[in-house]
Amino acid sequence: MRSKNVTLADIAKDLGISKNAVSLALRNKEGVSRELRERVMAKANEMHYQAVSKMQGCILALIPQRYTGAGSIFYHRLCFEMEAYAASLGYQLIISSVSESAEAQCQEPYMLSAARNQGIISIGNLSRDYCRMLQNLHLRYVMADQYYEDILVDSVTTANTSGAYLLTTHLIENGHRAIQFLGAVHRTSSLEDRWIGFRRALRDHDLPILSNSLLQDRECETETPERICRALDSMDELPSAFVCGNDSVAHNLILELEKRGLHCPQDVSVVGFDNVETYDVLSHDLTTYATPSTGIAHAAIDLLKEDSASPRRIQLLGRPIYRSSVRRMEE
Protein backbone atom coordinates (compact mmCIF):
# COMPACT_ATOMS: atom_id res chain seq x y z
CA MET A 1 0.00 0.00 0.00
CA ARG A 2 1.42 3.39 -0.95
CA SER A 3 1.76 6.10 1.70
CA LYS A 4 0.17 9.45 0.82
CA ASN A 5 1.97 12.74 0.34
CA VAL A 6 5.53 11.51 0.82
CA THR A 7 7.74 14.44 -0.22
CA LEU A 8 11.38 15.00 -1.07
CA ALA A 9 11.71 16.70 2.32
CA ASP A 10 10.46 13.54 4.06
CA ILE A 11 13.09 11.42 2.34
CA ALA A 12 15.80 14.01 3.02
CA LYS A 13 14.90 14.19 6.72
CA ASP A 14 14.91 10.42 7.08
CA LEU A 15 18.36 10.13 5.49
CA GLY A 16 19.80 13.29 7.08
CA ILE A 17 20.68 14.93 3.75
CA SER A 18 19.47 17.96 1.79
CA LYS A 19 16.30 18.01 -0.29
CA ASN A 20 18.40 19.07 -3.28
CA ALA A 21 20.55 15.95 -2.94
CA VAL A 22 17.41 13.80 -2.92
CA SER A 23 16.13 15.55 -6.05
CA LEU A 24 19.42 15.04 -7.89
CA ALA A 25 19.53 11.37 -6.94
CA LEU A 26 15.95 10.63 -8.01
CA ARG A 27 16.44 12.42 -11.33
CA ASN A 28 19.74 10.56 -11.92
CA LYS A 29 21.63 13.86 -12.19
CA GLU A 30 25.28 14.57 -11.46
CA GLY A 31 26.21 16.00 -8.08
CA VAL A 32 25.68 12.98 -5.83
CA SER A 33 27.74 9.82 -5.43
CA ARG A 34 26.61 6.43 -6.70
CA GLU A 35 26.34 5.17 -3.13
CA LEU A 36 24.12 8.08 -2.07
CA ARG A 37 21.95 7.69 -5.17
CA GLU A 38 21.34 4.04 -4.33
CA ARG A 39 20.49 4.92 -0.70
CA VAL A 40 18.01 7.58 -1.84
CA MET A 41 16.39 5.21 -4.35
CA ALA A 42 16.04 2.51 -1.71
CA LYS A 43 14.55 4.91 0.83
CA ALA A 44 12.15 6.44 -1.70
CA ASN A 45 10.96 2.98 -2.68
CA GLU A 46 10.61 1.98 0.98
CA MET A 47 8.51 5.09 1.69
CA HIS A 48 6.49 4.57 -1.54
CA TYR A 49 7.36 8.01 -2.85
CA GLN A 50 5.61 9.10 -6.04
CA ALA A 51 6.51 12.20 -8.00
CA VAL A 52 3.52 14.48 -8.47
CA SER A 53 3.04 15.72 -12.02
CA LYS A 54 0.37 16.24 -14.64
CA MET A 55 -0.01 12.97 -16.49
CA GLN A 56 -2.35 11.82 -19.23
CA GLY A 57 -2.71 8.31 -17.83
CA CYS A 58 -1.64 5.90 -15.12
CA ILE A 59 0.23 2.60 -15.21
CA LEU A 60 0.25 0.31 -12.18
CA ALA A 61 3.59 -1.38 -11.43
CA LEU A 62 3.45 -4.25 -8.93
CA ILE A 63 6.56 -5.49 -7.14
CA PRO A 64 6.84 -8.14 -4.41
CA GLN A 65 7.23 -6.52 -1.02
CA ARG A 66 10.30 -8.71 -0.39
CA TYR A 67 12.08 -6.76 -3.17
CA THR A 68 11.56 -3.33 -1.60
CA GLY A 69 14.33 -3.57 1.00
CA ALA A 70 17.75 -1.95 0.79
CA GLY A 71 19.30 -5.15 -0.58
CA SER A 72 17.25 -5.19 -3.80
CA ILE A 73 19.21 -2.51 -5.64
CA PHE A 74 18.55 -3.98 -9.09
CA TYR A 75 14.78 -3.69 -8.66
CA HIS A 76 15.03 -0.20 -7.19
CA ARG A 77 16.93 0.85 -10.29
CA LEU A 78 14.46 -0.87 -12.60
CA CYS A 79 11.47 0.83 -10.91
CA PHE A 80 12.93 4.31 -11.14
CA GLU A 81 14.06 3.89 -14.74
CA MET A 82 10.59 2.68 -15.60
CA GLU A 83 9.04 5.63 -13.78
CA ALA A 84 11.27 8.13 -15.57
CA TYR A 85 10.51 6.67 -18.99
CA ALA A 86 6.78 6.55 -18.32
CA ALA A 87 6.86 10.21 -17.25
CA SER A 88 8.72 11.19 -20.42
CA LEU A 89 5.82 9.70 -22.40
CA GLY A 90 3.20 11.50 -20.33
CA TYR A 91 2.18 8.67 -18.02
CA GLN A 92 2.35 8.31 -14.26
CA LEU A 93 3.76 5.05 -12.96
CA ILE A 94 2.19 4.08 -9.65
CA ILE A 95 4.44 1.59 -7.86
CA SER A 96 2.65 -0.66 -5.38
CA SER A 97 4.21 -3.46 -3.35
CA VAL A 98 2.49 -6.84 -3.04
CA SER A 99 2.67 -8.34 0.44
CA GLU A 100 3.33 -12.04 0.91
CA SER A 101 -0.20 -12.55 2.25
CA ALA A 102 -1.80 -10.69 -0.66
CA GLU A 103 0.29 -12.74 -3.08
CA ALA A 104 -0.57 -16.04 -1.38
CA GLN A 105 -4.30 -15.20 -1.34
CA CYS A 106 -4.24 -13.76 -4.87
CA GLN A 107 -5.85 -10.53 -3.72
CA GLU A 108 -6.53 -7.94 -6.37
CA PRO A 109 -4.08 -5.00 -6.24
CA TYR A 110 -4.99 -2.18 -3.89
CA MET A 111 -4.44 0.43 -6.63
CA LEU A 112 -6.30 -1.53 -9.31
CA SER A 113 -8.45 1.47 -10.34
CA ALA A 114 -5.30 3.20 -11.61
CA ALA A 115 -4.47 0.23 -13.85
CA ARG A 116 -7.78 0.49 -15.71
CA ASN A 117 -6.35 3.46 -17.56
CA GLN A 118 -3.26 1.92 -19.18
CA GLY A 119 -2.64 -1.47 -17.57
CA ILE A 120 -0.34 -3.39 -15.23
CA ILE A 121 3.36 -4.24 -15.19
CA SER A 122 4.56 -6.87 -12.71
CA ILE A 123 8.22 -6.57 -11.77
CA GLY A 124 10.26 -9.56 -10.63
CA ASN A 125 9.11 -12.87 -9.27
CA LEU A 126 5.43 -12.92 -8.35
CA SER A 127 3.86 -16.36 -8.00
CA ARG A 128 2.28 -18.15 -10.94
CA ASP A 129 -1.19 -18.07 -9.34
CA TYR A 130 -0.93 -14.35 -8.63
CA CYS A 131 0.18 -13.59 -12.19
CA ARG A 132 -2.65 -15.70 -13.54
CA MET A 133 -5.07 -13.66 -11.42
CA LEU A 134 -3.64 -10.50 -13.00
CA GLN A 135 -4.05 -12.01 -16.47
CA ASN A 136 -7.68 -12.86 -15.71
CA LEU A 137 -8.45 -9.21 -14.93
CA HIS A 138 -8.46 -8.74 -18.72
CA LEU A 139 -6.42 -5.56 -18.56
CA ARG A 140 -3.25 -4.88 -20.50
CA TYR A 141 -0.56 -6.78 -18.62
CA VAL A 142 3.22 -7.08 -19.06
CA MET A 143 5.76 -9.05 -17.03
CA ALA A 144 9.17 -7.43 -16.51
CA ASP A 145 12.17 -9.61 -15.56
CA GLN A 146 9.94 -12.68 -15.31
CA TYR A 147 7.74 -14.97 -17.40
CA TYR A 148 5.82 -18.21 -17.12
CA GLU A 149 5.58 -20.64 -20.03
CA ASP A 150 1.87 -21.22 -19.42
CA ILE A 151 0.81 -17.59 -18.90
CA LEU A 152 0.54 -16.04 -22.34
CA VAL A 153 1.14 -12.33 -21.81
CA ASP A 154 3.82 -9.94 -23.03
CA SER A 155 7.11 -10.19 -21.14
CA VAL A 156 10.62 -8.76 -21.27
CA THR A 157 13.77 -10.12 -19.65
CA THR A 158 17.49 -10.04 -20.25
CA ALA A 159 19.07 -12.86 -22.27
CA ASN A 160 19.75 -14.94 -19.17
CA THR A 161 20.69 -18.18 -20.92
CA SER A 162 23.10 -16.47 -23.28
CA GLY A 163 24.66 -14.43 -20.46
CA ALA A 164 25.33 -17.46 -18.25
CA TYR A 165 26.68 -19.36 -21.25
CA LEU A 166 29.20 -16.60 -21.96
CA LEU A 167 30.33 -16.35 -18.33
CA THR A 168 30.75 -20.12 -18.02
CA THR A 169 32.63 -20.28 -21.31
CA HIS A 170 34.94 -17.54 -20.05
CA LEU A 171 35.83 -19.71 -17.05
CA ILE A 172 36.42 -22.73 -19.29
CA GLU A 173 38.65 -20.69 -21.60
CA ASN A 174 40.68 -19.74 -18.54
CA GLY A 175 41.38 -23.38 -17.78
CA HIS A 176 38.65 -24.16 -15.23
CA ARG A 177 37.18 -27.65 -15.42
CA ALA A 178 35.43 -28.09 -12.05
CA ILE A 179 32.79 -25.34 -12.08
CA GLN A 180 29.83 -25.04 -9.75
CA PHE A 181 26.58 -23.12 -10.21
CA LEU A 182 25.36 -21.44 -7.02
CA GLY A 183 21.75 -20.30 -6.94
CA ALA A 184 18.19 -21.47 -6.30
CA VAL A 185 17.42 -22.44 -9.88
CA HIS A 186 13.74 -23.24 -9.30
CA ARG A 187 12.96 -19.86 -7.72
CA THR A 188 12.56 -17.71 -10.84
CA SER A 189 12.56 -18.10 -14.61
CA SER A 190 15.66 -15.89 -14.74
CA LEU A 191 17.68 -18.18 -12.44
CA GLU A 192 16.45 -21.26 -14.24
CA ASP A 193 17.46 -19.81 -17.61
CA ARG A 194 20.91 -18.97 -16.22
CA TRP A 195 21.19 -22.55 -14.99
CA ILE A 196 20.32 -23.75 -18.50
CA GLY A 197 23.03 -21.54 -20.02
CA PHE A 198 25.55 -22.85 -17.50
CA ARG A 199 24.67 -26.47 -18.28
CA ARG A 200 24.79 -25.84 -22.02
CA ALA A 201 28.30 -24.38 -21.83
CA LEU A 202 29.53 -27.39 -19.83
CA ARG A 203 27.86 -29.79 -22.24
CA ASP A 204 29.42 -28.08 -25.27
CA HIS A 205 32.85 -28.54 -23.68
CA ASP A 206 32.26 -32.12 -22.43
CA LEU A 207 32.54 -31.14 -18.76
CA PRO A 208 30.60 -32.67 -15.83
CA ILE A 209 27.72 -30.88 -14.14
CA LEU A 210 28.21 -30.61 -10.38
CA SER A 211 25.36 -30.33 -7.88
CA ASN A 212 24.85 -28.67 -4.48
CA SER A 213 22.20 -28.33 -1.78
CA LEU A 214 20.96 -24.95 -3.00
CA LEU A 215 19.99 -26.35 -6.37
CA GLN A 216 17.71 -28.94 -4.80
CA ASP A 217 15.96 -26.42 -2.50
CA ARG A 218 12.77 -25.45 -4.34
CA GLU A 219 11.48 -23.51 -1.32
CA CYS A 220 14.49 -21.19 -1.19
CA GLU A 221 13.55 -17.52 -1.63
CA THR A 222 16.96 -15.95 -1.14
CA GLU A 223 20.47 -17.36 -1.22
CA THR A 224 21.39 -16.25 2.31
CA PRO A 225 24.91 -16.51 3.77
CA GLU A 226 23.67 -19.35 6.00
CA ARG A 227 22.37 -21.30 3.01
CA ILE A 228 25.60 -20.70 1.10
CA CYS A 229 27.54 -21.95 4.11
CA ARG A 230 25.43 -25.10 4.10
CA ALA A 231 26.00 -25.59 0.37
CA LEU A 232 29.77 -25.29 0.78
CA ASP A 233 29.70 -27.75 3.68
CA SER A 234 27.86 -30.27 1.50
CA MET A 235 30.64 -30.37 -1.10
CA ASP A 236 33.27 -33.10 -0.82
CA GLU A 237 35.69 -30.87 -2.70
CA LEU A 238 35.49 -27.22 -3.68
CA PRO A 239 35.47 -26.44 -7.41
CA SER A 240 38.02 -24.07 -8.90
CA ALA A 241 35.24 -21.66 -9.94
CA PHE A 242 31.63 -20.67 -9.20
CA VAL A 243 28.99 -19.23 -11.52
CA CYS A 244 26.58 -17.38 -9.20
CA GLY A 245 22.92 -16.73 -9.92
CA ASN A 246 23.38 -13.01 -9.27
CA ASP A 247 25.85 -10.54 -7.81
CA SER A 248 24.32 -10.78 -4.34
CA VAL A 249 25.05 -14.51 -4.24
CA ALA A 250 28.59 -13.85 -5.49
CA HIS A 251 29.07 -11.22 -2.78
CA ASN A 252 27.89 -13.57 0.00
CA LEU A 253 29.93 -16.44 -1.41
CA ILE A 254 33.15 -14.41 -1.40
CA LEU A 255 32.51 -13.37 2.21
CA GLU A 256 31.96 -16.97 3.26
CA LEU A 257 35.06 -18.16 1.41
CA GLU A 258 37.14 -15.52 3.18
CA LYS A 259 35.87 -16.77 6.55
CA ARG A 260 37.32 -20.12 5.54
CA GLY A 261 40.69 -18.62 4.66
CA LEU A 262 40.09 -18.76 0.89
CA HIS A 263 40.48 -15.79 -1.41
CA CYS A 264 39.05 -14.74 -4.76
CA PRO A 265 40.54 -15.24 -7.31
CA GLN A 266 43.76 -16.74 -5.87
CA ASP A 267 41.98 -19.81 -4.47
CA VAL A 268 38.56 -19.74 -6.11
CA SER A 269 37.28 -17.79 -9.13
CA VAL A 270 33.80 -16.26 -8.91
CA VAL A 271 31.45 -14.70 -11.46
CA GLY A 272 28.11 -13.00 -10.75
CA PHE A 273 25.19 -11.71 -12.80
CA ASP A 274 23.42 -8.31 -13.16
CA ASN A 275 26.38 -5.91 -12.61
CA VAL A 276 24.98 -4.35 -9.44
CA GLU A 277 27.76 -2.00 -8.36
CA THR A 278 26.79 -2.06 -4.68
CA TYR A 279 28.10 -5.59 -4.33
CA ASP A 280 31.60 -4.56 -5.38
CA VAL A 281 32.33 -3.05 -1.96
CA LEU A 282 34.93 -5.74 -1.28
CA SER A 283 36.95 -4.52 -4.28
CA HIS A 284 37.01 -7.98 -5.78
CA ASP A 285 36.34 -6.48 -9.20
CA LEU A 286 33.67 -9.04 -9.97
CA THR A 287 33.29 -10.60 -13.41
CA THR A 288 29.57 -10.40 -14.20
CA TYR A 289 26.92 -9.86 -16.86
CA ALA A 290 25.39 -6.39 -17.19
CA THR A 291 21.62 -6.76 -17.27
CA PRO A 292 20.11 -3.98 -19.44
CA SER A 293 17.78 -2.56 -16.79
CA THR A 294 17.10 0.59 -18.81
CA GLY A 295 16.17 -1.49 -21.85
CA ILE A 296 13.89 -3.74 -19.78
CA ALA A 297 12.18 -0.70 -18.23
CA HIS A 298 11.60 0.97 -21.61
CA ALA A 299 10.47 -2.23 -23.35
CA ALA A 300 7.93 -3.01 -20.62
CA ILE A 301 6.30 0.40 -21.04
CA ASP A 302 6.38 0.13 -24.84
CA LEU A 303 4.81 -3.34 -24.79
CA LEU A 304 2.01 -2.04 -22.59
CA LYS A 305 1.28 0.83 -24.97
CA GLU A 306 1.29 -1.26 -28.15
CA ASP A 307 -1.51 -3.54 -29.29
CA SER A 308 -0.55 -7.00 -30.49
CA ALA A 309 -2.54 -9.90 -31.86
CA SER A 310 -0.43 -12.40 -29.91
CA PRO A 311 1.76 -12.25 -26.78
CA ARG A 312 5.40 -11.24 -27.26
CA ARG A 313 8.38 -12.50 -25.26
CA ILE A 314 11.39 -10.21 -25.57
CA GLN A 315 14.91 -11.05 -24.43
CA LEU A 316 17.37 -8.17 -24.42
CA LEU A 317 21.08 -8.82 -24.76
CA GLY A 318 23.26 -7.48 -21.98
CA ARG A 319 27.03 -7.71 -22.03
CA PRO A 320 29.61 -9.74 -20.14
CA ILE A 321 32.07 -7.70 -18.08
CA TYR A 322 35.32 -9.58 -17.61
CA ARG A 323 37.19 -8.43 -14.52
CA SER A 324 39.84 -9.80 -12.19
CA SER A 325 37.70 -12.20 -10.11
CA VAL A 326 38.63 -14.96 -12.56
CA ARG A 327 42.10 -16.48 -12.37
CA ARG A 328 43.69 -18.22 -15.31
CA MET A 329 44.54 -21.79 -14.34
CA GLU A 330 48.05 -22.99 -15.00
CA GLU A 331 48.43 -25.61 -17.69
Image (cartoon, grey):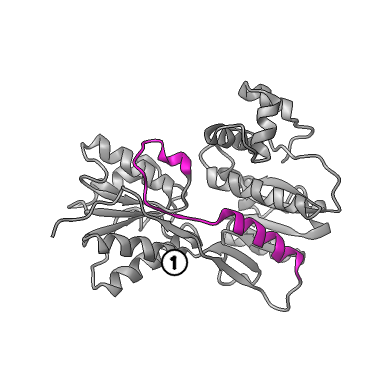
Above or below residue 136? Residue 221 is above
- State the residue lying farthest toward the bottom: 309
225 sits to left or right of 93: left
Q: Position of residue 138 (x, y in %)?
A: 76, 67
Q: Assign the C terminus to one quadrant of the image.
A: bottom left
Compared to residue 210, the image places residue 269 above or below, namely above
Q: Position of residue 235 (x, y in %)?
A: 22, 52
Q: Residue at x 28, y 51 (%)?
A: 326
Residue at 70% in and 46% down: 96
- Labels in figure, total: 1
Q: Which residues are magenta?
A: 277-306
The image quadrant of residue 165 is: bottom left
State the SS at label 1: helix
2 horizontally vs 252: left or right: right
Residue 282 x/y as whole percent: 36, 36
Quadrant of the rendered image containing residue 210: bottom left
Looking at the image, which is closer to me, 223 or 25?
A: 25
Is residue 210 in sight in this rendering? no
Residue drawn where x is 49% and y is 59% of the image: 188
Which residue is denoted by mark 1 in the rendering?
161
Whether residue 88 sits left or right of residue 244 in the image: it is right
For the point 69% across and 78% down, the residue is 310
Q: Is residue 238 left or right of residue 65?
A: left
Question: Which quadrant would residue 66 be assigned to in this image?
Answer: top right
Which percent across, then down, holds residue 111?
A: 77, 48
Residue type at numbered disc 1: Thr
